[in-house]
C-alpha cells in the first residue's frame, strides 16, 4: 500500500469512529490550510469514547506530511495490534451448567453430529446416500 492509500484508510477509520468526515469539502482558499494540517483533528475530540491509542493511529495515518504518515500497511497493523493490547476487556465469569441442562446441551451437540437422512426435493421420499437421482420419481438432486 502507498502512503496515500493509508491516508484514505485513516479517513475511513475517522468516519467509522466518529460518524463524520474529518473535514468539510474545502474551498480553494482553504486548500492551503488543509495541506498544512490546520483542519486536522483527532477522532477523540469528536468522540471521547475512542481510545487514545486508536486516535493516535488515525491522526498519524492522516498526517499532512506524507513522510510523517505510515509508509507500509504492516506499520499501521502493528500499531493497531499494540493499541488492542492496551485495551484489555474483563473476561466474563464462567457460568455453571446444571445436570439436566448439561445433558440437554450434549444431546443437541450429538444430534448435530449424526448424519441427517436425505429426501428428494420433488416427491420428498428418502434417497440412497450415494444417489444423485430419485429412484421413485427420477428427478436429479
Image: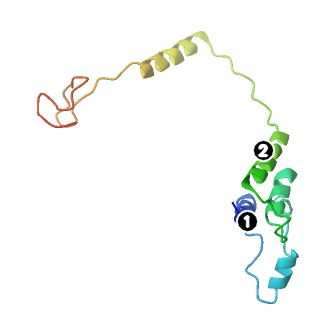
The location of residue 16, given as percent across then percent down, is 70, 59
SS for dot 2: helix
Q: Which residue lies at the image location 11% right of the left edge and 33% below the top edge?
A: 137
Q: CA distance from mark 1 to mark 2?
A: 19 Å
SS for dot 1: helix
The image quadrant of residue 55 is bottom right
Residue corresponding to mark 2: 81
The image quadrant of residue 68 is bottom right
For mark 2, does the 10 Å Cα neighbourhood hold few (<14), some (14 to 19), or many (20 or more) residues? few
The location of residue 85, given as percent across then percent down, is 82, 40
User: In the figure, 128 relative to 86: above or below?
Assistant: above
Count the labels in the image. Answer: 2
Q: Which residue lies at the image location 57% right of the left edge and 14% below the top edge?
A: 102
The location of residue 97, given as percent across then percent down, is 63, 16
User: In the figure, 140 relative to 60: above or below?
Assistant: above
Residue corresponding to mark 1: 11
Q: Which residue lies at the image location 86% right of the left edge and 57% below the top edge?
A: 56
The image quadrant of residue 113 is top left
Camera sees residue 71? yes
Q: Which residue lies at the image location 49% right of the left edge and 20% below the top edge?
A: 109
Question: Which residue is most to the top?
Answer: 99
Left or right of residue 134, residue 71 in this image: right
Q: Earlier in the sequence, mark 1 or mark 2?
A: 1
Left or right of residue 37, residue 94 in this image: left
The location of residue 83, given as percent across then percent down, is 82, 46
Left or right of residue 126, residue 104 in this image: right
Any mark on residue 46, and which?
A: none
Amino acid at each position: 500500500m502507498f502512503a496515500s492509500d493509508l491516508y484514505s484508510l485513516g479517513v475511513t477509520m475517522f468516519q467509522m469512529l466518529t460518524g463524520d468526515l474529518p473535514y468539510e469539502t474545502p474551498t480553494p482558499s482553504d486548500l492551503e490550510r488543509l495541506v498544512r494540517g490546520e483542519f486536522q483533528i483527532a477522532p477523540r475530540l469528536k468522540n471521547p469514547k475512542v481510545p487514545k491509542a486508536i486516535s493516535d493511529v488515525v491522526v498519524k495515518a492522516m498526517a499532512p506530511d506524507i513522510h510523517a504518515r505510515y509508509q507500509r500497511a504492516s506499520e499501521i497493523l502493528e500499531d493497531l495490534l499494540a493499541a488492542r493490547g492496551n485495551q484489555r476487556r474483563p473476561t466474563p465469569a464462567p457460568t455453571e451448567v446444571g445436570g439436566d441442562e448439561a445433558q440437554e446441551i450434549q444431546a443437541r451437540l450429538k444430534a448435530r453430529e449424526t448424519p441427517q437422512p436425505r429426501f428428494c426435493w420433488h416427491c420428498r421420499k428418502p434417497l440412497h446416500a450415494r444417489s444423485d437421482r430419485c429412484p421413485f420419481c427420477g428427478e436429479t438432486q
